[in-house]
Image (cartoon, rainbow, N blue to C red):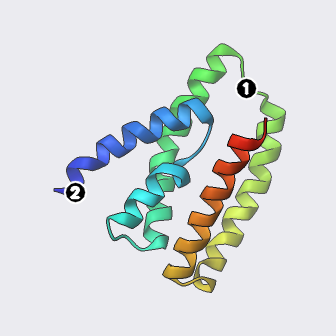
Amino acid sequence: MTLLYLPIVGLFSGVIGGLTGTGGGLTVVPVLLLLGYTKETAIATSFLSMIFLALVSVGLHGAKGTIDWKVGMLVAVGAVVGAVLANYLHGVFNETTFRYAFAAFLVFMAGTLVFKH
């Protein structure tokens, strides 16, 4: 039954991601954690779904000419290195610590967005 909700989660993730530039970490990972997936499976599954979101978004924004390709590629270099590093760090945090740290990060980011201006 929960599998029927996943396309709705994807729709929400696509709209939020398309409007804000966020990835699945903000929307898909928390839902998968609530559905009982481990942190590593939730994160990896989110990345898989984000490949398709990113391809479509890059195509649409590229057609509009709104991508700064140099900045995007420089950020990508750091992101790739960070992803490799994170893959090795998965074992450092247990599930409970990860959930608390991730929730604290989301609350911090929400507060930053609300009170920044």
- Point out residue 9 in the picture as x, y percentages from the top left corner: 36, 45
Disc number at residue 79? Answer: none
Q: Residue furthest top?
A: 64
Vertical arrangement, residue 47 with respect to residue 70, above or below: below
Label 2: few (<14), some or many (≥20) within 10 Å? few
- Asked if residue 41 lies left or right of residue 21, the reply is left
Residue under the point 62% across and 37% down: 21
Mark 1: secondary structure:
loop
Query: Which of these two is toward me, 90 or 25?
Result: 25
Q: What amino acid is at disc 1?
A: Ile
- Asked if residue 11 lies left or right of residue 90, the reply is left
Q: Which is more N-terminal, label 1 or label 2?
A: 2
Residue under the point 76% across and 38% down: 72
Q: What amino acid is at disc 2?
A: Thr
Whole-number angstrom distance, CA of label 2 to CA of label 1: 36 Å
Query: Which of these two is toward me, 117 or 68?
Result: 117
Q: Quadrant of residue 36?
A: bottom left
Residue under the point 49% across and 72% down: 40
Mark 2: secondary structure:
helix
Q: Quadrant of the C terminus?
A: top right
Q: Quadrant of the N terminus?
A: bottom left
Q: What residue does disc 2 label?
A: 2
Disc number at residue 67? Answer: 1
Which numbered disc, 2 or 1, marks the residue closer to the eye? 2
Q: How many marks?
A: 2
Vertical arrangement, residue 62 with respect to residue 49, above or below: above
- Point out residue 86 in the picture as x, y percentages from the top left corner: 66, 70
